[in-house]
Image (spheres, coloured by chain):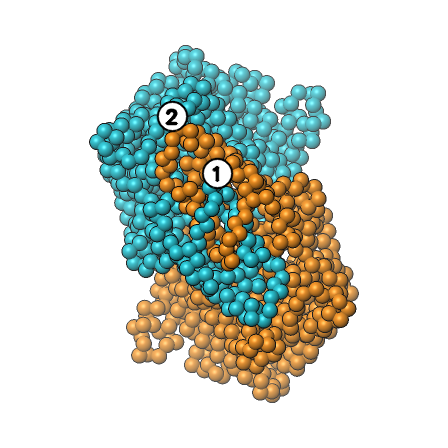
Chain colours: A orange, B cyan
């Protein structure tokens, strides 16, 4: 370090342009944010001519540097755009030639890797030394420094700490710094559109049919997986300590944290192939639903583990109070985020219902976008998790608001989020490839890595097989062995694990986790992605199914369809309860929520008690009165969805297509006698005619690249 | 200032979380970017238990503060989202009730003002004093400080200078700071989508018909207006000096700079009303074309003026060398940016033509988006102006790439940019309202403000009337007095003037300009926006015209249509040349560019010389051979556009609808004998049948809110 090395070149001129040469690495979207720096108001200079002259020269030098930096920012963003463009073109080529062994995300990673190597070894080390100076008299770091330079005050903000050993290496390669973004970018810019899209494009029908199993896999399964991986890794860490491979602290909570971040599965590759091959819809729903929800679970779980702070000095040992506090935090954050998301969704539904905004699709789309985004901000402002809130907001929007939108806005909103999702996802994956070489704090520990691979394998196994066994006890439509193997195989890790891992790379343990996560993502995306098609055929999983068709009813369900089968009457208590719960929800949703929030459903005047007639009249959409029939029909596929839901939880596989269709299951709708007529009626109509509309009107899960495939 | 006031609370813990409480004000998109700070790798701490304990406490305090700051960021972004949501709902109400005296942008400003007042006077002053410390031994400011804190190094980046008088006020209100964005955000995030949309949605037919006049207004007119306003303002400044109202320097170049930024007109309000009322299309084209191009001219002009740096010590006096350097810079930047934009557009067209990407609309849309964005970055990386490049990229994309896109991508891209444009524009306007109260460095100078209003009025008059007079000498379809008055009246200022003004508020002069610009924008948007409808009827400007119909031919043009009128044969040399130039361009575009870049036009094998037959065969789209006719037809409206262009520059008002249609003008197509047959043929077909398709297939200027109006 040579403090003040080249100081003369660097003073600030009259215009007081801030020098942004070592800007925070958050230049993601904006080439820009960092652009030509701030030109904050400067105190008027009042020096003589000579001083002004030198000041003008300095200003010139400053401007040049600022410009240079701006250019570098632009170039580094261009690099990513180039990467994405290349990826898009190659994806097209692959799709065109029907190559399936490598998914777009795998491809994005490979291109990222290549560019990473080039940047790492191909670019000259530009040093920023002369721009720094040392100021050693303090004994603490502050967030802001005010530096008094011959009467002028300059404001500095803290960027972070630099470990002494890295003082040189950190500064050596500006380009590497430029392409290394602030981790929060992933969490706050790239993940929300991905997660929202997942919620918004949820194929509700199959999702709700398997809701119980999905919830079990996502909540119980993720927790099981997290604890098993955490404990196994703690063993690995102990082993590493014994053989002297561990040079720094690695607590039990760190291991659990690793378990949490690595438990978020992201079978985007598998699902893309499923979609392309039209593989079994129930398996699809199980995998998709699980991965969507376990992302949310993993986020909340990891922040609960971070919050686990034992009281005593002897930290990082088990403490029951702290444990329950963590559980409380988990529940609090999860339910809070859920509520936020649902509430914003409901508000949007109300606004779109009670205004005639649908006459102006642009306004409607803009409002929809803003409201969905505000969910994220609202949750963050209240201390909940924005990403989780966004997920539930997406589901609510799809369930209610979508009905109120104009036809144009429906396609607009879907397409908008589809594009955002596509770009964000491929960006993350290409960044992952890049990070393997440009991230400067990798800790490669072979034992830890091998241990982690074994642990995630065991964790996944301990999650899928026992849970499936228990679920099969209660399920009519069993989850077969081949499905279980496929779910086991599809447990690959992706964007969410990466985003969680990169979020905090401050300690040695976290750096090791980050490196390991990166390698796990690489491995699983490439191997599992490439092996999906062979695996499907090896496991005899049906492909070529029309996604809106259902599997031919097997014997059990057929029995039910023929009449009131013994099972549906004599199920065990748990099954009864869950079915009752969901019937309750269905009738509540159908009779109250739908009519309040959308233009469909029975008029509230018929469903609400007589004494709130005025309110009911206000809340019910006039359309429902005017032309009740057409509107109900318009919504038929949505009712259908929940018809399915009810039926499923009555443990039958009654489906919407005529072949297996009948409405015997409504026999079990005893909890909602009063409203039975209307919902049954809707159901009947749906069973008869819903099929033609389902594909065009339901919120289908449209996978990014498969539209025209 | 109490340096180190509360130091004990603030040390950095093991995790070395950066404290981001006074983050750069660029939190625009991301609640986020600024989120929970960077967690850069920290050197492993190796102190005793007591130290660790205190470090843990500090860490806790730090985390809390970081979280608090993140919350504030979220809240401030939420404020803007709320503002936009409110604006959208009120716009809907206004549209619903057909209120036209206040445009959405005016509304956004009013809401911004209200929130600004609340923030300014309603929020408690939270002080950040204890977070700062003073460090006075340097005599220069550096971009980066490395602070050695008992062995650890912390990195600080310069934020900017703070004038001594503002030391307290700047720190007093965190909320005000939070809602004040980095000016570069406007330039680098908000303007590009607005400008790209303008280029992409250009109604080419009417634009090209009036291209000559539009170019004259945009280039000559803006330059004239800039110089007149600059000189008038210099007079005002002199006056202010005389009466002692000016407390700091205000150079002649500053006045010219003001002239440049305030010459960018933005008649978004007027055009929205035009669109709604279906006012005269030629007037629409003139206003829209002028405002689109003069934005570009104003940007480049203002940066050329900044670059005007006389050589001698006696700065800010006129210097011929510096002047010509500025002119050179103007031409260089303008042509460079133009080239960048056109080249990226052409590359996108080639890629979309030669790959079968249109089978995958999502890929296509993503590619389109990325390529368009890369124009901006590329231009910035090369030192040109991204915003200008983006404009020409938009025009090129609309002219070529749009033809190659799948139907789905066409609507997707249009809708995507429409939404972005809408959000960005309303954001800027609501920010403007907010800035009047939250911007902390206003300099209100009544004399300057009154002078500026007079100057822009005179500048606009000196720009419109003389230029229209000269243009009318050469135009067949004269620009009538009522049109000239309307153009005079519509010269309001908007987003571009604001973005240019806020970009640099470092000096006293610039602050005064910023305040004045803000007031001018307010005044013109409200008054002119509200007065448009009365003005239209007062000036007898036709409304209710079908935008794709043309005005009934007046006598002059009818004469030409009947045969080879005297004027078209005996025009002066300039007219001949320009007509020749555009004929040349038309035939070149039609015969070479279109066939190379799109799937339409005549096969290259017929237009290129025989010796490059192989090349021609490679470049020509196979579709052109396979089914030449249908494809030509498909593109008819585009050919039509240029048919019009040629005709216009043959100085007639031949139009596409049957009523006035004939192809006499092709008589003047002498410069392209060889290719006449094909283009004439296309023209003939267009004249006969293009009309039905024009409205559905051309790149129409769809104004944000008018889709279903």
SS class, disc 2: loop
Q: Residue at x 62, y 65 (%)?
A: B46
Q: Foreground residue, B521 or A343?
A: B521
Q: Foreground residue, B474 or A257?
A: A257
Q: From the viewer's perspective, is B553 left or right of B673?
A: left
Q: Nearer the viewer, mark 2 or mark 1?
A: 1
Quick one: label 1, few (<14), some, or many (20+) residues within 10 Å? many
Q: Relative to A703, say whether B273 is above or below.
A: above
Q: Does residue A129 appear anywhere in the picture?
A: yes
Q: Residue at x 53, y 29 (%)?
A: B336
Q: Residue at x 29, y 58 (%)?
A: B122
Q: From the viewer's perspective, is B6 left or right of A425?
A: left
Q: Foreground residue, B288 or A59?
A: A59
Distance, label 2 to label 1, CA atoms, is 22 Å
The residue that disc 2 covers is B316
x and y, in percent, of residue B276 in the image: 34, 42
Label ID, residue A11: 1
Q: From the viewer's perspective, is A637 left or right of B514?
A: right
Give the chain letter at badge 1. Answer: A
């Amino acid at each position: 370090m040579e403090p003040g090395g080249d100081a003369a070149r660097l003073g600030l001129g009259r215009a007081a342009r801030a020098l942004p040469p070592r800007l925070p690495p958050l230049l993601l979207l904006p080439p820009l944010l960092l652009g030509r720096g701030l030109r904050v108001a400067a105190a008027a200079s009042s020096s003589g001519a000579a001083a002004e002259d030198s000041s003008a020269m300095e200003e010139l030098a400053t401007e040049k540097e600022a410009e240079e930096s701006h250019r570098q920012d632009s170039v580094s963003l261009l690099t990513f755009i180039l990467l994405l463009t290349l990826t898009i073109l190659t994806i097209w080529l692959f799709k065109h030639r029907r190559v399936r062994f490598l998914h777009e995300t795998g491809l994005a990673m490979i291109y990222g890797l290549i560019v990473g190597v080039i940047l790492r070894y191909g670019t000259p080390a530009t040093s920023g030394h002369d721009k720094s100076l040392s100021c050693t008299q303090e004994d603490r770091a502050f967030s802001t420094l005010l530096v008094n330079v011959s009467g002028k005050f300059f404001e500095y903000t803290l960027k972070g700490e630099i470990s002494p050993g890295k003082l040189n290496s950190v500064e050596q390669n500006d380009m590497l710094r430029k392409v290394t973004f602030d981790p929060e970018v992933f969490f706050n810019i790239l993940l929300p559109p991905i997660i929202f899209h997942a919620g918004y494009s949820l194929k509700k029908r199959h999702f709700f049919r398997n809701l119980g199993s999905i919830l079990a896999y996502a909540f119980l399964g993720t927790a099981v997986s997290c604890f098993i991986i955490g404990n196994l890794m703690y063993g690995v860490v102990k082993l590493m300590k014994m053989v002297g491979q561990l040079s720094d602290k690695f607590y039990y909570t760190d291991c659990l944290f690793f378990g949490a971040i690595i438990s978020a599965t992201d079978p985007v590759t598998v699902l893309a192939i499923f979609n392309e091959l039209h593989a079994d819809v129930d398996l699809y729903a199980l995998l998709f639903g699980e991965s969507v929800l376990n992302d949310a679970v993993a986020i909340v779980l990891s922040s609960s583990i971070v919050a686990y702070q034992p009281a005593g000095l002897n930290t990082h040992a088990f403490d029951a109070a702290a444990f329950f506090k963590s559980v409380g935090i988990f529940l609090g954050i999860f339910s809070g985020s859920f509520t936020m998301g649902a509430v914003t969704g409901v508000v949007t539904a109300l606004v779109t219902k009670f205004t005639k905004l649908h006459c102006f699709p642009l306004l409607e789309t803009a409002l929809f976008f803003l409201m969905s985004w505000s969910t994220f901000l609202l949750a963050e402002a209240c201390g909940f998790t924005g990403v989780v809130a966004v997920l539930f907001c997406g589901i609510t929007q799809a369930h209610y608001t979508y009905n109120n939108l104009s036809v144009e806005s429906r396609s607009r909103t879907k397409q908008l989020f589809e594009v955002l999702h596509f770009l964000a996802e491929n960006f993350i994956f290409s960044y992952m490839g890049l990070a393997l070489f440009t991230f400067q704090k990798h800790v490669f520990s072979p034992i830890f890595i091998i241990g982690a691979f074994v642990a995630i394998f065991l964790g996944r196994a301990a999650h899928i097989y026992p849970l499936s066994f228990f679920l099969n006890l209660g399920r009519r439509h069993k989850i077969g062995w081949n499905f279980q193997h496929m779910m086991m195989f599809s447990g690959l890790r992706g964007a969410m694990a990466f985003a969680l891992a990169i979020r905090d790379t401050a300690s040695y343990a976290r750096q090791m986790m980050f490196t390991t996560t990166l390698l796990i993502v690489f491995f699983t995306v490439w191997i599992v992605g490439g092996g999906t098609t062979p695996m499907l055929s090896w496991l005899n999983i049906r492909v070529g199914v029309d996604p809106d068709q259902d599997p031919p009813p097997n014997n059990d369900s057929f029995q039910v369809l023929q009449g009131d089968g013994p099972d549906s009457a004599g199920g065990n208590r748990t099954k009864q309860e869950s079915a009752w719960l969901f019937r309750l929800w269905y009738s509540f949703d159908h009779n109250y929520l739908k009519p309040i929030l959308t233009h469909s459903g029975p008029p509230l005047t018929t469903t609400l008690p007589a004494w709130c007639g005025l309110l009911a009249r206000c809340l019910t959409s006039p359309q429902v009165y005017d032309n009740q029939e057409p509107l109900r029909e318009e919504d038929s596929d949505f009712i259908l969805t929940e018809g399915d839901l009810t039926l499923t939880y009555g443990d039958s596989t009654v489906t919407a297509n005529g072949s297996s269709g009948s409405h015997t299951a409504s026999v079990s709708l005893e909890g909602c006698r009063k409203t039975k007529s209307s919902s049954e009626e809707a159901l009947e109509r749906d069973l008869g005619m819903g099929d033609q509309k389902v594909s065009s009107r339901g919120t289908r899960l449209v996978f990014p690249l498969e539209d025209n495939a």
